[in-house]
Amino acid sequence: MVPERCSIMVNGKVCTLPPSCIVSILSEKEEYMIGLVCVDHILLMKTKALSMQKSGKINKGKIRFQKVKPVMTDCILNLKDID
Ligand SMILES: [Zn+2]
């Protein structure tokens, strides 16, 4: 399940802005998601990811930001309602 909010915490508070980018680490063979960020926190996330890589909490690799694709939830719901 994809969280609906930015995964950055500022001063102990979770950012409530909707995420606009998926953050993932591209290692030699695989890519894995480490979180989601809003536009305001892209740079902060990059800094955090770099320090996590330095301390060995996450794998080393390229930090990748991908735009979140818009989800057409309304369309899916409407289709389910049709008998
Ligand atoms: Zn944020």
Image (tube, rainbow, N blue to C red):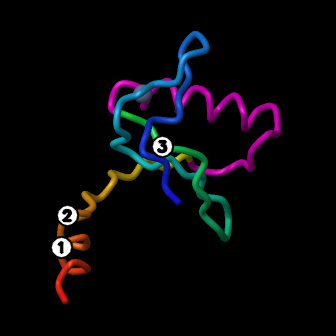
Q: Position of residue 3 (x, y in %)?
A: 49, 48
Q: Work out which residue is located at the far top of the displayed protein and give it.
A: 11
Q: Position of residue 34 (x, y in %)?
A: 60, 47
Q: Quadrant of the C terminus?
A: bottom left
**In the image, what residue type sits under mark 3?**
Leu
Q: Work out which residue is located at the far front of the displayed protein and give it.
A: 83
Identify the main secondary structure in magenta.
Answer: helix
- Disc 1 packing (10 Å; few <14; some 14–19; many ≥20): few
Q: Label for residue 68? A: none
Element assignment for label 2? helix
Read off the residue under disc 1: 78
Q: Is residue 60 left or right of residue 76?
A: right
Name which quarter of the figure residue 16 lies in.
Answer: top left
**In the image, what residue type sits under mark 1?**
Asn
Read off the residue under disc 2: 74
Q: CA distance from mark 1 to mark 3?
A: 28 Å
Image marks 1 and 2: residues in contact by CB distance under 8 Å: yes
**In the image, what residue type sits under mark 2?**
Asp
Magenta residues, start to end:
39-62
Near-viewer residue (34 or 77)? 77
| 11 relative to 28, above or below | above
Q: Label for residue 36? A: 3
Element assignment for label 1? helix
